[in-house]
Amino acid sequence: MKAILWTKYGPPDVLQLGEVEKPAPKDNEVLIKIIATTVTAGDCETRSLDFPIFLSLALRMWIGFRKPKENTIPGTELAGVIEATGKDVKNFKIGDPVFGAAGMAFGTNAEYICLSEDTGETGNAVAIKPKNMSFEEAATVPFGGRDALHFLRLANLQGGEKMLINGAGGSIGVFAVQLAKYFGAEVTAVDSGEKLDMLREIGADHVVDYTQEDFTKGEQVYDIIFDIIGKISFSKSNKVLKKNGTYLLANPMSQIIRGLWTKMTSGRKVIMQTASGTTENLIFLRELIEAGKLKTVIDRSYLLEEIVAAHEYVETGRKKGNLVITVGHDRKV
């Protein structure tokens, strides 16, 4: 089968289209023919190991010190069709349209993947695809939707609370805005100017162009600040977060020391953890989508063999919502 191969750590061109053996499902696994997958900012960071040194070292010890030796096909989310099932699989049958996440096992930038029927240790999960979404649309949900839902639940978001989302225009942010509105919050979305119209369209009550305005100098005080991109200054943001308010950090490794200090020296909560996917979360998101309460935003679509260009575009920071990779199984390249 065709797959993208992660040959070493570095810029986008370390990714190459190649041929690998098609996997076969274990007893509790399903074999999925992938129709669409994605590229996220997290995929780009992982590819280049653009992390603090202690995290980068840990990843090298796990994946491979000099170059990837394990999990060498990138990608974390997908939508496709069940092609085969292991003998113990009970919830899926051949032909079922599904969407899901591979978690830290990666492997979705390929024609096929095997995933456990049940949520695994790596954070993989799979569920029946929303009926009112295309495969391309559904492929964008398992990562961004899952992470947004995970953090909003941790914050115990209540109706009427004021929430600011920093980095609201990306894969996680577009779902966080909509889910926060669904839970009854008043939402301020912060991102660059070209993304503000889109953020208004998906429900943001207020928008801030960070290139023109510093939200920490405003008069509004928030119950929750959700920093998706790891760029806020705690010393400045404390001025606009209630004394018993909550910081949500989706990218905690760049802020762990400051976050811990803020947690210890103030009455504010600081929630720093990685999100893991569950089948129950996918089903919850699917129900919202089918009820018309949640939608995705797709900026661009690339072919699998255009993976380098896709990574290059994501790294510009201009991506509005999601970037989709379509997998053409019968296409000659």
Image (cartoon, rainbow, N blue to C red):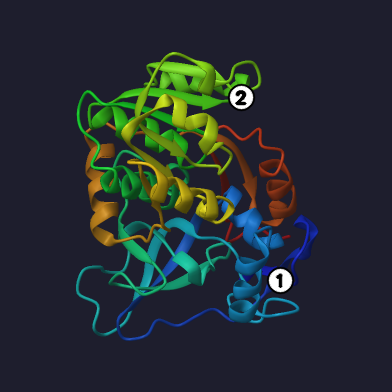
Q: Which mark is residue 219?
A: none
Q: Amino acid at mark 1?
A: Gly
Task: State which tag comes first along the sequence, 2 or 1.
Answer: 1
Looking at this view, is 149 or 243 the one in front? Answer: 243
Instruction: Give residue 80's position: percent from left, percent from top.
Output: 42, 58
Would you identify the image quadrant in which residue 192 lies? Answer: top right
- Say which residue label 2 marks: 192
Would you identify the image quadrant in which residue 48 lies? Answer: bottom right
Instruction: Give residue 213's position: percent from left, percent from top.
Output: 60, 16
Residue 64, placed above or below residue 207? below
Instruction: Give residue 273's position: percent from left, percent from top.
Output: 41, 57
- Say which residue label 1 marks: 18
Q: Is residue 179 visible?
A: yes
Q: For numbered disc 2, what is the local secondary structure?
A: loop
The 10 Å Cα crowd at callout 1, few under 14, some 14 to 19, many 20 or more, is few
Instruction: Give residue 285's position: percent from left, percent from top.
Output: 28, 45
Furthest-front residue in this view: 265
Quadrant for the N terminus in the image: bottom right
Q: Amino acid at mark 2?
A: Ser
Q: For numbered disc 1, what is the local secondary structure?
A: strand
User: Residue placed at 36% from the left, 50% from the top?
Assistant: 146
Residue 206, placed above or below residue 232? above
Would you identify the image quadrant in which residue 203 lies? Answer: top left
The 10 Å Cα crowd at callout 2, few under 14, some 14 to 19, many 20 or more, is some
Looking at this view, is 221 or 2 the one in front? Answer: 221
Is 39 left or right of 184, judged from the image as shown? right
Q: Is residue 296 visible?
A: no
User: Residue placed at 56% from the left, 44% from the top?
Assistant: 230
User: Residue placed at 66% from the left, 37% from the top?
Assistant: 317
